[in-house]
Image (spheres, grey):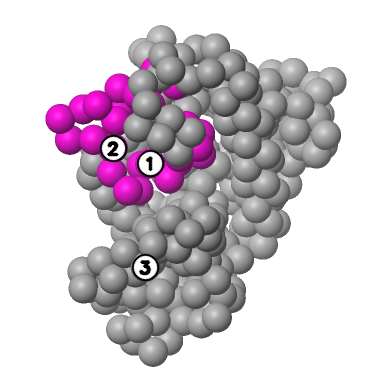
Amino acid sequence: MIQQFSVELLQQCMFLAGPTAVGKTEVTLELAARIPRMEVVSLDSMCVYRGMNIGTAKPSQEIRDRIPHHLLDLIDPHEEFSVVDYLGAARKACSEIVARDGVPLFSGGTGLYLRAVLRGVFEGPPADWEIRNRLQSQAEEAAARGDHFWLMRQLEKIDPDAALKLHPNDQRRLIRAIEVFELTGKPLSGLQQQHSLPKHQQPKHVYWLSPDRDWLHDRINLRVNQMFESGLVDEVHELLNRDTPIGNTARQGLGYKEIIDGLGGSCAADLTESKRAEIVELIQTRTRQFAKRQHTWYRNLEECTEVEVSEVESPGGIADRIQSLIARHE
């Protein structure tokens, strides 16, 4: 079964995507100042979790007080949230925004969510916990041997196209892809081949910010340093020590996984400077790799219009250019 937006609702939405740390939040704020009644719909898979604020670069409460934001802080970190769940929540939020004559602007960097909104998503067979628990156990046994890519290799054997689109740390989606193959005998990537709508039915305003690579890498490195200075390690420690600790999906978030693994059950206060520096460097490396995969997502979506950005242009200048594109595409 395919879950998707209606064409009529989709055409009333705008989209601003881009790799992590490119400056989407700043440009979104500038656009909201230029376009009346604009409301922001988060396009970020980790921002749905309450209490995960620093590592997700979640918009501050001050920003959210100025401009309505949706699909933030929906669930606790021990809960699960699928792409189908996201699509349903997004559809409801957009319908409500449009009903009050507002303009929904999707803003974020999760390419899987962007594709789901634009093209729909295959719901798939229900969960088979026997399969899931077996795969989880096998992955943990492999990790204990130092093999952290066992799940990825299993998926590459049966569905290399799906493996290309997933992060090696994203255990939940790796397991789901293998599970679907075992249940249906068909690769998930084939079942998810939702093609773009005909040109005249596509939303007109789907933009993604395309930065210079070296500039983006500098911004990523700086952002990770700032997150640590803002208390990311303490945030992770608090999540681990809740009555119901952070779940399997949320703990795979960039930054969170590396710190959890680095702490190894120790207190945040016990983290040595050398270990801290090692974790910072690892997060920076993996975030740069993730940004490269995000580029691939946007380039492969024909609905997306590339907007090149550089360090010499302000968020206001970028918003002005996007506003010009909006006028041209009307």
Residue drawn 17% across and 35% down?
244
CA neighbours of label 3 inside 10 A, class few (<14), some (14 to 19), many (20+): some
Q: Does the image show residue 231?
A: yes
* Residue bearing mark 3: 138
Secondary structure beneath dot 3 equals helix
Task: Name the image quarter holding residue 179.
Answer: bottom left
Bounds of the magenta segment: 233-260
Position of residue 262 measured from the top left corner of the image (x, y, whole percent): 48, 33
Residue 55 in percent (x, y) is at 47, 28
Give the distance between the C-alpha atoms of the residues marked 1 and 3, in whole angstroms.
18 Å
* Pointer 1 with pointer 3, Cβ within 8 A: no
Residue type, label 1:
Arg
According to the picture, the residue beneath numbered tag 1 turns out to be 251
Q: Which residue is mark 2?
A: 246
Q: Residue furthest front?
A: 145
Q: Secondary structure at mark 2?
A: loop
Does any portion of residue 319 appear in the rendered image? no
Give whichever of 281, 109 is nearer the camera.
281
Kind of residue indicated by mark 2: Ile
In the rendered structure, which disc, 1 or 3, sits on the residue that comes first in sequence?
3
Residue 121 sits in quarter: bottom left
Q: Position of residue 38 (x, y in %)?
A: 45, 28
Front-lying residue, 230 or 161? 230
Judge whether residue 247 is colored magenta.
Answer: yes
**Are the residues flagged by discs 2 and 1 in contact, CB closer than 8 Å?**
yes
Please report whichever mark, 3 or 2, sits nearer to the chain's N-terminal start. 3
Q: Quadrant of the C terminus?
A: top right
- List x then y, in percent, for residue 9: 38, 52
Residue at 23% across / 44% down in the picture? 79
Report the Cα–Cα distance between label 3 and label 2: 21 Å
